[in-house]
Image: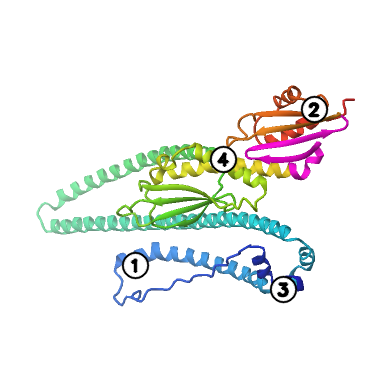
Amino acid sequence: QKFEKGVITVGEFLTLLQVHVPIQKPRHSHLPANCAVSAPPTPEELLYSQYIYLPKLRIYEEDCQALSQKIDELKPYVNVQDQLLVNVNRSLWEVMRTCSDEELKNFGAELNKMKSCFIKESKILAHNEKVTLYTKLLQSAQEQQGKLQSRIEEVDELLKEAERCLVALEAVRAFSAALFSHSFFPFLLELKSLKAEEEALQSAPRIMGLVYLCRELSELETENEQMLAQMNQLQEKEKSCRELLETYDFTEWEITEWSEQQAVFSFLYDSIELIIVFGPPIDGDDFGEDPSRKIVSLNFESLLDEEEAPPSSCLVQRLIFQFIESRGCWQEQCPTLCYLPQVLQDVSLVVSHCKILGDEIEFLERWGGKFNLLKTEISDTKVKLLFSASPAFAKFELTLSLSANYPSAPLPFTVQKKIGNIGEKEVSAVLSSVPVGYHYLQRIVSSIHQNLLQDPR
């Protein structure tokens, strides 16, 4: 009633469409009560504070300020949910109030798909921000390490200088004692010869050290050039790997629950659940993520309402569970937690292919007239396609048998001739020229339309 009268808010409108947008409140950390220590810090604690804790604190403070700024920028959008839909987007309200319940439900489903995409994008952004933060921490730690190393070298030089001073003082003391002895003049001659030897010994290591430093500098420059070339190669390889990951990303699962006892994963818009029950926890595994932890049971459940769902969605569910049942006992294939990623990858690949198949069937149901397709009917795991074209004077029904390995293998088919001369032989010749792969069903229909149903002139 509020929706029809135009007094519904944006948040109530989303709730009406079953689109739930949870808004998390920021959580602030507080220092513990025993944080303040009255005892004076030790030299070791001062070094830790100067070179480790304070640089990390400055970086975290900058990150917190950036996050606070983003939160302040997003706060005005939170209040939009409490505003009237008419004031926010009147044209949307005028269009939606004339829609039927089924159209509202479909619009809500599309909004949920968009919300799922935005959630994934926000996770990727959060991950990239963490990478940036950890990179800054690493750079800061390296800078502080360089400063501390240079300070250590300075102190070492000071200690060496102090040792040289002590040696010189000892020589002066011995010289003063020799002034009062009877062998003063022979001592002067010996001291002069020792000084000449010392100058010769000091000049030789300097020349050798200079040669050694030049050679080491040349080697370092060569090594630096090689490292730069390797870094460029690794960056190119990383770029190509990222492109491959984006192209072949078949991740179709989301974690809805993870506790000490069990984990729950959802697939295909929350219509399929994977429930995993863990064995007893392992000592020392505080987070329940030890790869050797046993899995007691692993079961798939369908949450799809087949009476309300469209036929294409029911077909997709049947094909996915056909694959699940064909693998036998999943618990034997995944006895411990380390096998779980492979299970999720295998199921995601099948879900991705079947989801694309469902999109193809919906496309043919909506736009089949462009391909002389009168009717698309689904029976169990079979799709019946009724073609009719007056220019070719032909009408026939093509029945395709689908399986969970779609679209990696050719589809078995039968042809029932209604009008004209197009039968199984002609259709088989066309289907044999269509390669398997992406949008296989859609390309089969397009090929039949182009090769068999056009005007023979």
How far apart marks 4 and 2 lie (CA) works out to: 31 Å
Q: Which residue is mark 3?
A: 2
Viewer-closest of 156 and 274:
274
How would you rate the neighbour count of disc 4 (Cα within 10 Å): few for under 14, some for 14-19, many for 20 or more?
A: many
Q: Quadrant of residue 81?
A: bottom right
* Magenta highlight range: 364-391
Discs 1/4, front: 4
Identify the residue at image location x=68%, y=44%. Answer: 359
Disc on the earlier residue, 4 or 2: 4
How far apart marks 2 and 3 lie (CA) works out to: 55 Å
Viewer-closest of 298 and 188:
298
Q: Which residue is mark 4?
A: 350
Tell me the amino acid under the disc marked 2: Asn
Q: Residue furthest right?
A: 457
Discs 1/3, front: 3
Q: Which residue is mark 2?
A: 451
Q: Which residue is mark 1?
A: 46
Identify the residue at image location x=40%, y=64%. Answer: 53
Residue 429 numbered tag: none
